[in-house]
Amino acid sequence: MSDTILSMENITKVYPNGFVANRNVSFSCKKGTIHALLGENGAGKTTLMKILFGFLIPDEGRILVKGQPVAFKDPQDAISHGVGMVHQHFMLVDELSVAENVVLGMEPLRHGLFDMNKAVSVTDELARKYNFDLNPRALVQECSVGVKQKIEILKALLRGAEILILDEPTAVLTPQETKELFVELKKLRDMGHTIVFISHKLNEVKELCDDFTVLRSGRTVAVGDTGDYTEQQLSNMMVGRNVELVVKKEKPEGGREQVVEVRSLGYTSHTGKKLLDDVSFSLHKHRILGVAGVEGNGQSQLGELMTGLRRITHGDVLVDGVSIKGKNVRSIRKAGVSNISEDRMKYGSALTMSVEENIIADRYFTGRYSKGIRLDRKAIRSDVDELIRQFKVDCPARDALAGMLSGGNIQKMIVAREFTSNSKVIVANQPTRGIDVGSTEFIRNQLIRLARDKGVAVLLISADLTEVLEVSDSIIVMSGGRITAYFEDASAVNEMELGEYMLGIKRMTDEQIGRALG
C-alpha cells in the first residue's frame, strides 16, 4: 500500500478575469511527514491550498486523500475528510476562553446548556496528548501569540485533522516560541500526522521539513528532499535566479542629524489598558532604527501614532522640530512621513480600487498629475507603469483591482507608493511579512538604499528578527508598552538574546536605556 496520504493531480484554476493561478499543478505528501510548499508571492500556493481546503473548486484535476478521490464542496467537507488548516491570521474570539475557542461549533452540552467543565476537560486532555502547554480557562486576549498558534492547531486536531496546513505559522513568533512549536510539530509528525508547511523562511524549512514542492508562475517546478538542497538552492528554484540571502549594507556616513523626536509617547486603550508607556527615542538621517518585540507590546500603536492612524493624547512626536500632534494623515504625510502599515488590507490599500489608483493615492492632487480639476491621465499612466515595472508588481494591468492581487503583490504595490513619495521618514511596519525571498531581498535593499543614498530616517518595526538584525543600524526592544532594551550597534546582539528581552527574561534598567538613548 502506498504511503502517500494526499495527492493533487494536474490541478488547474483560472479566475474569472482570465488569470491562471494554477496550471497542471501536481502536489503530494507522504503520511507522517512535514512537507514544505514553497514559491514566490503569486506562484499559486494560496490558490492550491484554498482548493485543498474546499474554499475553491478546481477547473481541472483531482484530489485523492488516502487513495480515494474527493471533491470538497467547502471547508467543512474538507475537515470531515481529515484536512485542517491554520491560517496566518488567527480566527479566534479574544473575549472567550481557550477551551471555548477550541470547542467552538461543537460545544458540549449539559441539560441543553453549554458545559464549560466538559469543554475544559476536552481541551486539557487534548493538550496533554500533544504536549501543548495551555491553560484552558485563560482568556484568549490574555494569551501570547505562540499560545494562540497552539489553540488554532488544537482546534483542527479536535476536528479530526490528519493533514494539517500551516500558513506562515512562525511569522510573529520569537525564536524561543518557534523552537517550541517545532518540537510540537515534530511530535505530531511522529504520531502519524502529515503537515503542509508554507513558509518563506528557508532556514526553518531546512530545520523542520522532510521534503518540499516548489511552485513558480502557477506550475510545479521542483520536488525533493530538503536535506539534499541548500537554502540558496531552494531560493534560486523559487525565484528562478540567484538571490542574495544576506543583506549587504555599508555603515552610515556623516553625523547624527535628528529628523524625528518621540517624546514620552503614551497610549491607553478604551478598556483602560496602557499599551504605550512613556516611550522616547529619536530617528536620524541616513539611519535605520529597528523595533523588536512580541506582537501586542505596543509596536503597532507606536507606528499608528507616528503616522496619524491614531490620535496622540499623551506625549508628542516632532518631525524636523515641528509637532504632528493633532494633525491628520495627509498633513503628517505632507510633513514628510511615509507609512507601510502593518495591516496592508485595511490601511495600506483600497482593494476595490485599481492598482493605478492605489499607487497615486497620495499624489493625484499634485501639480504633476492635476491640471485644474482634471487629471493628467497620460502622466499617471506613464509613471504607474514605470513603478509597476521597477517594483516588480505582478498584476494583469494597471487598471486591475488591487483585491485580485496576491498578498505579496499588494505589499509591493504599497511599497512602490511609499518608497517614491519623497519622504524624510519611513515608518515600515512588517514590510516583508508573508513576502517571498526575492521580494524580501528587494524591499530590504530598497530600505537601505533610501536611508544611505537619500538620507531617509527609517523606523523598522518587524517580527522577523533576522530582518531587524540585518537591516537595522540600532535596535530598541519593546515589552509591555515600554522600551526594555536599546542596542546602539545592531551587530552587537543575536536573535536568541533579542528573544530573551522580548519575552521579558532579560531587561535593561531605565537608567541604562536613558543613557544609551541620550
Image (cartoon, helix red, strand yellow):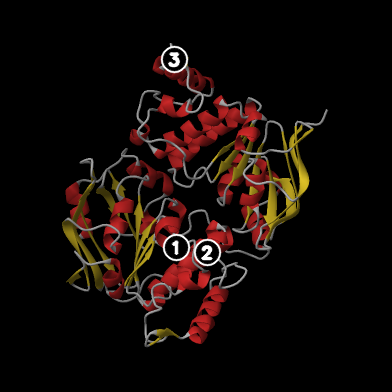
Q: Which mark is residue 349?
A: 1
CA gap between label 1 and label 3 equals 46 Å
Quadrant hosting residue 418: bottom left
On residue 112, which mark appears?
3
Residue identifier under label 2: 402
Q: Are marks 2 and 1 in contact (CB under 8 Å)?
A: yes
- Going by the image, does 47 lie left or right of 463? right
Sequence-wise, the earlier of marks 1 and 3 is: 3
- Residue sitting at the far bottom: 371
What amino acid is found at the position of numbered circle 1 in the picture?
A: Ser
* Residue 428: quarter of image: bottom left
Marked residue nearer the N-terminal end (3 or 2) = 3
Crowding around mark 1 (Cα neighbors within 10 Å: few <14, some 14 to 19, many 20+) is many
Report the amino acid beneath label 3. Answer: Gly
Tell me which residue sits at (71%, 31%) in the image.
Answer: 31
Quadrant (top left/top right/bottom left/bottom right) for the N terminus: top right
Q: Secondary structure at mark 2?
A: helix
Q: Secondary structure at mark 1?
A: loop
Badge 3 vs badge 2, beta-carbon distance below 8 Å: no
